[in-house]
Amino acid sequence: MNRRLLLAAALALGAYAQAPALAQAPATEIVEKKVFETANYVTRGGATIPAIRIGYQTAGTLNAAGDNAVIVTHFFSGNSHAFGRYAEGQPAGYWDAIIGPGRAIDTNRYFVISSDTLVNLNVRDGRTVTTGPVSVNPSTGRPWALDFPVVAMRDFIEVQKRLLDSLGVRRLALVTGASMGALQAIEWAAAYPEIIDRVMPVIGSSEFDPWSIAWLDIWESPIRLDPNFNNGDYYAQGREPPTRGLAEALKIVTVQAQDRPALARFGRRVAEGQDPLRRIGDRFEVERFLDEAALARARISDANHFLYLVRANQLFLHEYENSEAALRRSQARWFVVASPTDRVFMLDYNTEMVALLRRLGRPVDFAEVTGPLGHLNGVVGMAPLADRIRAFLQN
C-alpha cells in the first residue's frame, strides 16, 4: 500500500506517467501521439488564435457510419495519455485498466480518442502538444504570455470538435472524463446534444459555484505572489520563471485532491535532520515530500498555463443561465461516478447532478468509486467499475 500511495501522490501533481503502476490490467495496445493543427480559431470571448496545435491519440477503428467514437477528456493536470503505451516497456495511460481490447471501453468495438487541451499544464514535459501562453505569438515573434486570449471550457470542446471532424467522427457513443475531464464531458453534452448517446462524468460536478471559484483562486494565488511572476512576463532570456509559486500552487492541488489515508503513511515523523520543536523553519516528513514532489512537477509545467486552466474551469457552462438550462439540452443517457471522500468535487455535487438529471427526465445511473485516495480514486481506481461501465455502454 505504501508504494501505491506514493505513486498516487505523484499523480496528484500531474505525474500521470506514474499512474499505470496502479492499473489493475496490463496494457496491450501501443498508441501513437499525433498532432492536430487548425487555424484562425475564434474563442468564445471573440479573440482569434491564428494557429492551434494539440496532441492526441486514438485506439480502435472508426466504422463506416462514423458513429462508434468515444472521446476521453482529461483532468486538470493530465494530458491525452489516458490509455495504451507509447512503446513497449513505457508506462500506460491513467485509465488503461478500463480502455483497451476487451475492456470496459472496448477498442475492438469503439474508436477511442483522447486529446491534450489548449493551455495544457504539461507544456514542458516533452510529450504534451498544446497552444497557450508559452506559444509564440506570430504577430510579435515572442511568447504570448498573458496576451494569449482567455479560453473557456467551451473552447476546449470546440477545438476537440474540429479534431473529431477531421477524423470523420459523426456521432459519439460516449463522452467521458475525470475531474476537469468530467466538466468537459458535461460541456460536450450541452454544446452538441444531437450527436451524443452517452455521458459519463467521473468525480465532477454540473455546478461550478462561488465556493469552487474561490478555491481555484486560492490554487493560483501563490503564482501571482511569486516575485518572478512579473505579471506573466517571464519568458525572456535571463528571467527566472515563478517556479516556487507554481510549486506551492501544485501543493495545494495535491493535498485537496487526496484524502487523509493517502498521506497517513508519513505519520507525524519529522524530516531527517530536522527538529520542528526547536526551529520554526524545520519540516515534517510530509511537508518535505510535498515540497520535493511539487518542485519537480513545477519544472515541467508553466505557471501562466496554470492560470489559464483555472480560468477555463471557472468559465464552465458560462454560456447558460444555470446548470439546469445546460443539462436540459442533453438527449443522452448518463452514468455519474463519484468518490465519497472527494475533497474537490464532493459527493453532494454529484448527487445534486443526479437529482437534477432525474428531474429533467434524463436516464441516469450512479456509482461510487472508492479507495484511500479521495478525488484521485476516479483517476486511478476505476477498474472495479468495469462491469458497470460495460453494461452502460450496452444500453
Image (cartoon, helix red, strand yellow):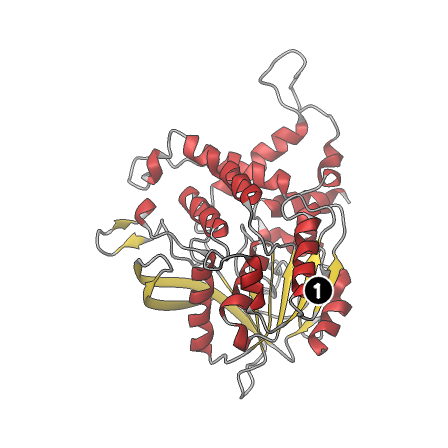
In the depicted view, which residue is nearer to us: 358 or 13? 358
Q: Determine the residue positioned at 47% across, 34% down.
A: 221
| Image quarter (top left, top right, bottom left or bottom right) of the C terminus | bottom right
Residue 45 spot, x, y in % from top left: 35, 56
Q: Is residue 134 visible to us here? A: yes
Describe residue 291's horizontal placement relative to residue 300 as left or right.
right
Badge 1 crowding class, 10 Å Cα cut-off, few under 14, some 14 to 19, many 20 or more, is few
- Quarter of the view holding residue 281: top right
What's under tag 1, amino acid-wise? Pro
| Image quarter (top left, top right, bottom left or bottom right) of the N terminus | top right
Q: Is residue 32 visible to us here? A: no
In the depicted view, which residue is nearer to us: 139 or 300? 139
Position of 20 relative to 243 (above/below): below
- Quarter of the view holding residue 228: top left
Describe residue 128's horizontal placement relative to residue 110 as left or right.
left
Residue 10 spot, x, y in % from top left: 62, 44
Position of 237 relative to 51 (above/below): above
In this view, the residue farthest toward the top is 278
Q: Determine the residue positioned at 60% across, 41% down.
A: 254
In the depicted view, which residue is nearer to us: 320 or 380? 320
Q: Which residue is mark 1?
A: 26
In the depicted view, which residue is nearer to us: 23 or 327? 327
In this view, the residue farthest toward the bottom is 64
Residue 329 spot, x, y in % from top left: 55, 69
Secondary structure of the residue carrying tag 1 is: loop
Q: Determine the residue positioned at 49% across, 68% down.
A: 191
